[in-house]
Amino acid sequence: MNSTLALARAEIRRLGRNKRYSIFSVGLPVVLYLVIAPSVKHVHVYGVSYPAYYMIAMASIGAFSGALTGNAQRISQERKDGWVRQLRLTALPANAYVIAKIIASMVITVPSIAIVLLLGRFYGGVHMELWKWLAVGGTIWIGSLTFTALAVALGYRFMPDTVQPMAMFVYFVMSILGGLWFALTGFLAKIGHVLPTYQITRIGTDLISNQSVPATAYLTILAWFAGFVVLAVLAVRGTAETV
Amino acid sequence: MTQGRMGASGAPVVSFENVRKVYGHVKAVDGLTMDLRPGETVAFLGPNGAGKSTSLDMLLDLRKPTSGTIRMFGSDPYHAIKAGRVGAMLQSGGLMPEVTVRELVALVTGFHPRPLPVDQTLKRAGIASFAGQRVDKLSGGQTQRVRFALAIVGECDLIVLDEPTAAMDVETRQAFWANMKAEVAEGRTLLFATHYLEEADQAADRIVVINKGRLLADGTPSQIKARAGAKRISFRLDRIDEPFLLGLPALVNVEIRHDLVQIQSSDSDRTLYALLDAGYRPREIELSSLGLEQAFIAITTEDDNSTEDADSTVHDSTVHDSTVQDSAAQRADGYARNGR
């Protein structure tokens, strides 16, 4: 386990140095929040103020883009380059590579979520009890695991050239129809209901507005998570021969 | 085929037992059987596509054999690898980008159950001078040496290298083998794949020749060279007596075009003396060492004719293998154009 953690630490160090990663998963949501939140202070959506909704949405955007597009591309590229093969020749346990990726992804999403939540509190004027802050952040954090699982599935299944557009496509469909760029109404909201992105946002807004969260929200997220985990396991197993 | 080993004793470090690997209808490895003894330096020699990399991949548990058994230190290769007993460098092995050379070596050192000091590894692999550089900014030869460093980060009993000097210039290559000799001087077993006969000759004390997934020859470098017909003799002769030429001693192969005769011989002195003793006075005599490709033609030809005797006579026209014949024909064309 120690060497798996060492690999995870190295992964985190790499991500920290990667400018593209920082721009998309931290820079972009922060800038959007700074620009948009003040102009919609008095609008209400999903039962909360727009700055509160937008805080959750932007924190999700940053966390999910890092978990999905970043990881999928890297895993695919590192498989192609032979780094994954190289690791198999070491005394590292067989699944250490994937586990280290997941750990690194979980660690690196913390600041991108935390920064936007802090912005929401001190710039967007969102107020709630401490436990709710933790619950909102935690929901997004745990929810990002869904996309890490999908990233593993895509990264193990496809070559880098294919993975990048695929991950971007899934990311945009999920984030737009999930209501992360703007709140959904009418027909789009109906579609959004089946997506984990929408449900993660709604758990957050329901917490803020003191509403009880319907069980279907959790079940929807769990179903997607389980589905992606199955795909990921199949992809990792399926490529065991060629690495 | 030569089988059974003399020399080194002890339980085998590695054993292949009738190992086959089939992709669809392509037999990448076709019934490979061989043992590696402790302390041996063995060259795995063959042209591109001979099945060297597939064999090493199977040895390192990256691919599963279709049938047959591979054992390492008497157990499953996987366990030997996870116990850190093997240091390996693959052609297809990649490096983690975005970190420095030192960080990468330190990271992989940390995975090893019996690690060696990082500074020492950097020095032994000859990469200390660029340890602060980022891995993704290195040249091909530098990358290759970093891969080598990753193979020697810990104390191991077996080193496996797949075409270790592929991206290296001559100087780097020599430095590499100097380092390597120091590594194996401590009693380690070394198996390396190469398609350079010269490299196998200089570095190995045993050469295993494979082609099309089959073991063709197994012996010391001098034995292999003798079997391959180590020298080419070419000359012009006015009145050619083909049966006589075919009967020359130590002869492996003869090609005759008009008055030009090319002979592959495992003992050029004997062949030439016999020719002269018979009263022939050939003109424009040229003697040259055979490259690996020609050596392969000789060994493959021999193999296809199921001859066990290295001195046996094989005529060019009996070559079965079409690709071998093609390349022989191409070379003959080349000679014709060069006017030799």
Image (cartoon, grey):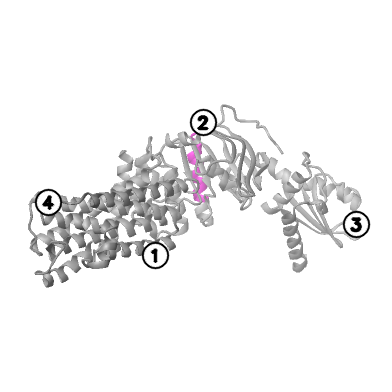
Q: Residues within 10 Å of mark 1 (few under 14, many from 20)?
A: few
Q: Which residue is mark 2?
A: B73
Residue at mark 2 shares a chain with residue at mark 3 = yes
Amino acid type for the residue under numbered disc 3: Ile
The quarter in which the C terminus of chain B is drawn is bottom right
**The numbered mark 2 sits on a residue in which chain?**
B
Residue at mark 1 shares a chain with residue at mark 3 = no
Which-is-in-front pick, marks 4 and 1?
4
Q: Which residue is mark 3?
A: B240
Horizontal and vertical percent for residue B87? 46, 41
Q: Residues within 10 Å of mark 4 (few under 14, many from 20)?
A: some
Highlighted range, magenta: B174-187
Q: Residues within 10 Å of mark 3 (few under 14, many from 20)?
A: some
Residue at 24% x, 59% y is A198
Of residue A3 and residue A144, the one placed in the foreground of this image is: A144
Q: Which residue is mark 4?
A: A132
Would residue B339 be found to the left or right of residue B35 on screen?
Answer: right
Which-is-in-front pick, marks 2 and 3?
2
Question: Mark 1: which secondary structure?
Answer: helix
